[in-house]
Amino acid sequence: MAKTFEELECWKMAIELDAQVYELVMNGKIFYPTSLRDRMLRSVGSIADNIAEGFERGGNKEFIQYLFIAKGSCGELRSQFHRSKRRKLIDEETFTKYYNDCRTVSVKLSNLITHLKKSDFKGNKYV
C-alpha cells in the first residue's frame, strides 16, 4: 500500500485531470457559462481532494467512503461534459477525450475500493 496519497495512481490521474480541465475552461479554449465552469472546477477538484482526505484519515472504511465520494464527483464531471456537448460548448473529440479520462479515473477508483474491501489491513490508525 502507498505511504502517501501522492503515490496512488488514481490520485495522480485525478490531479492531472484537474489541470487539464482547468486549462480547458479557464484559458479561453472554450467559453463556458460561469455557473457550469465553476461547477466543473469544483467537481474535478473534489476527485483528487477526496482521495487525499480519505487516505489521510488512516482507516480503510473511511478511505473507502471518501473514494466513493470521489467516484461520485467523477460521475458529476462526466455529466457536465455531456451537458457541455449538448449545448455545443465542446466538440465531439473534446467530449470523447474527457469522457474517457473520467471513466478511466472512475475505474481506478473502483479497483482501489475493491482491493481495500478484500484487504485484512484495517488502516494505519488501527496498527
Image (tube, grey):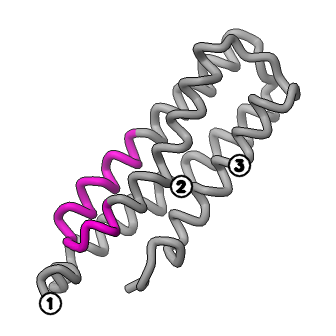
In the rendering, which numbered label is found on residue 127? Answer: 1
Disc 1 and disc 3 in contact, CB within 8 angstroms: no
Expressed as whole percent of the image width and height from the top left, the position of residue 120 reads 15, 85
- The label nearer to you, 2 versus 3, is 3
Q: Which amino acid does label 1 sit on?
A: Val
Q: Which amino acid does label 2 sit on?
A: Val
* Residue situated in front as seen by the camera: 107 or 66: 66
Q: Which of marks 1 and 2 is nearer the N terminus?
A: 2
Q: What secondary structure is marked by label 2?
A: helix
Disc 2 and disc 3 in contact, CB within 8 angstroms: no
Expressed as whole percent of the image width and height from the top left, the position of residue 59 reads 20, 72
In the rendering, which numbered label is found on residue 117? Answer: none
Q: What secondary structure is marked by label 1?
A: loop
Q: What residue type is labelled 3?
A: Ala
Q: Is residue 97 above or below residue 36?
A: below
CA–CA distance in space, label 1 to label 2: 29 Å
Q: Which of marks 1 and 3 is nearer the N terminus?
A: 3
Expressed as whole percent of the image width and height from the top left, the position of residue 78 reads 55, 33
What's the magenta region? 54-72
Expressed as whole percent of the image width and height from the top left, the position of residue 72 reads 38, 40
Left or right: 26 in relation to 13: right
In the rendering, which numbered label is found on residue 19? Answer: 3
Q: In this view, does 39 lie above or below 122?
A: above
Query: Which is the main secondary structure of the residues drawn in magenta?
Result: helix
Q: What secondary structure is marked by label 3?
A: helix
What's the residue at 53%, 55% (across, down)? 105
Q: Name the residue under label 2.
A: 105
Occupied quadrant, residue 121? bottom left
Q: Earlier in the sequence, mark 2 or mark 3?
A: 3
What's the residue at 37%, 68% (across, down)? 112
* Residue situated in front as seen by the camera: 127 or 84: 127
